Amino acid sequence: MVEHAELPSPDDPQAALAAVVALRRLANQLERAAVDHALRDGWTWAQIGQALGVSAQAAHKKLAHKKDLS
Amino acid sequence: MKLPRALQDVRTIEALLTGAEAEAQRAGDDLPGPEHLLLSAFGLPDGTARRAFERLGADPADFRAAVETAHRQALQYVGVTVPDNAGEFPPPPLGGVHRMTAPGQEVFQAAVKLSKATKPSLLRGGHVVAAVCGQEHGTVARALTALGIERSVLAAAAREALADR
């Protein structure tokens, strides 16, 4: 069962939407850092895509640095 | 030799957008938005963005810290604490062409529109300041509030800075 007691109240849209922006930003930063580590550890884009719940192509398109694309 | 106005404008726009991308990269954001455009405008050689802030007794350098504080406070609302020194994330890859968030595009277009309505009709940093002040919600609005700056007052200061030649 999902525990809702810890969820913040959405009745303050200003604060709740700002939190959504900040969480999205943090998630993107964490994603890039984790993928960098995974690549250094020898993960393939197929494995990274699987772990992120997207295709290998989608993961590569979003997260590969310019130097990896060449 | 004086550059033709159209070429001056192209150079300013290029500097503004390239600077905004660098600011977004530095902050670890995928795309530049209004806050990055404003930070980039502070570096434009016309100086009107900086002067708009200074007219209110505010230091443009404080705005960068206020943006980070706004994000940290927003995360605290959902019980997430990020330490001050958590800047170890790799930067996002740079795009080939200038891309921005939707609010970033709105601000840029509003700034260009404002610049066409002033004499000389050249884009300057003060136009970016006035344009971001039109955004009622978002990171810039919250960062300005944290600095104790009212958007309408800052917009007026930007117009004054633009009028001072």
Image (tube, helix red, strand yellow):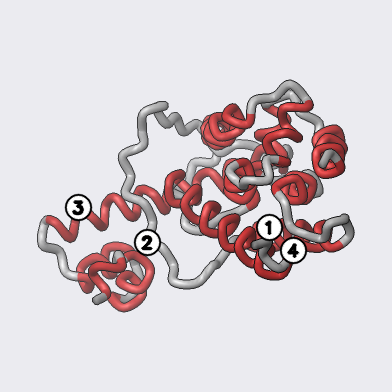
- Looking at this view, name the residue that lies furthest to the front: B1
For disc 3, the neighbor class at 10 Å (few under 14, some 14 to 19, many from 20) is few
Can residue B148 be spotted in the picture? yes
Q: Where is residue B128 in the image (x, y as percent from the top left)?
A: 72, 50
B86 lies left or right of B30: left
What chain does badge 2 belong to?
B
Q: Which of the 4 quarters of the picture holds residue B145? A: top right
Q: What element carries label 4?
A: helix
Front-most of residues B110 and A17: B110
Q: Disc 1 marks which amino acid? A: Pro
Q: Are marks 2 and 1 on the same chain?
A: yes
- Disc 3 secondary structure class: helix
Which label sits on residue B159?
none
Amino acid identity at mark 3: His
Q: Residue at x 27, y 74 (%)?
A: A69
Query: Along the polypeptide, which appears first: circle 4 or circle 2?
Result: 2
Q: Which mark is residue B103?
A: 1
Q: Which mark is residue A37?
A: 3
Q: Which of marks 2 and 1 is nearer the N terminus?
A: 2
Q: Mark 2 points at which residue?
A: B93
Contact between marks 4 and 2 (CB within 8 A): the answer is: no
The residue labelled by disc 4 is B109
| Chain under callout 1 | B
Labels 3 and 1 positioned on one and the same chain = no
Image location (x, y in percent) of residue A20: 57, 47
Residue drawn at 82 percent across, 60 percent down: B121
Q: What residue type is labelled 2?
A: Pro
Determine whether, in the image, residue B44 is placed left or right of residue A23: right
Q: How far apart are marks 3 and 2 (CA)?
A: 16 Å
The chain letter under disc 4 is: B
